[in-house]
Image (cartoon, rainbow, N blue to C red):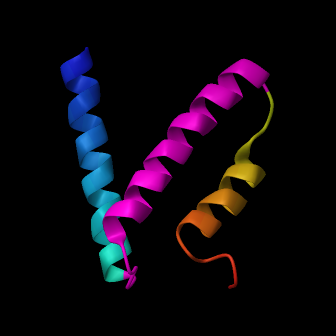
Amino acid sequence: MRAVVRRHRDWFRETLTALATAAGSPDPGATAAGLVLLRDAMLVGSYLDGGDVAASFRATARTVAGLSAQ
């Protein structure tokens, strides 16, 4: 199970890095790492709190990706 999760996380991080690069992020690796961490936190938070975290996730993800001013 750990190997499957690791492959998925690697793919997800690589995909986000490529997207951040294409979007002109000054540090695509850091942007991807922040978004992966945020997704992990969202999954845990929604499980523990049982609430809707989508709006908060979107707002925070935009900030992490450098899109908050748009």
The magenta stretch spans which residues? 23-50
Magenta: main secondary structure:
helix
Q: Is 2 within the magenta?
A: no
Rendered view: 14 above or below 18: above
Q: Residue drawn 70% across and 83% down?
A: 69
- Counting from the top left corner in percent of width and height, residue 34 is at 48, 54
Image quadrant in which the C terminus is located? bottom right
Up-down: is 60 above or below 70? above
Q: Is residue 29 left or right of residue 67?
A: left
User: Residue at the spot x=30%, y=39% of the render?
Assistant: 9
Residue 15, image x, y percentages: 29, 59
Q: Toward which corner of the image does residue 59 lie, by quadrant?
A: bottom right
Q: Is residue 24 above or below residue 38?
A: below
Q: Is residue 31 left or right of residue 18?
A: right
Query: Residue drawn at (67%, 58%), measured in percent from left and top?
Result: 60
Q: Quadrant of the N terminus?
A: top left
Q: Residue furthest top?
A: 1
Left-right relation of 38 to 32: right
Position of residue 55 relative to residue 62, above or below, is: above
Number of numbered discs overlaid on the protein picture: 0
Instruction: Give the x, y percent position of residue 41.
Output: 59, 36
Q: Position of residue 51 (x, y in %)?
A: 80, 30
Is 38 in the magenta?
Answer: yes
Question: With 24 as the anchor, is 55 left or right in this view?
Answer: right
Residue under the point 36% across and 73% down: 27
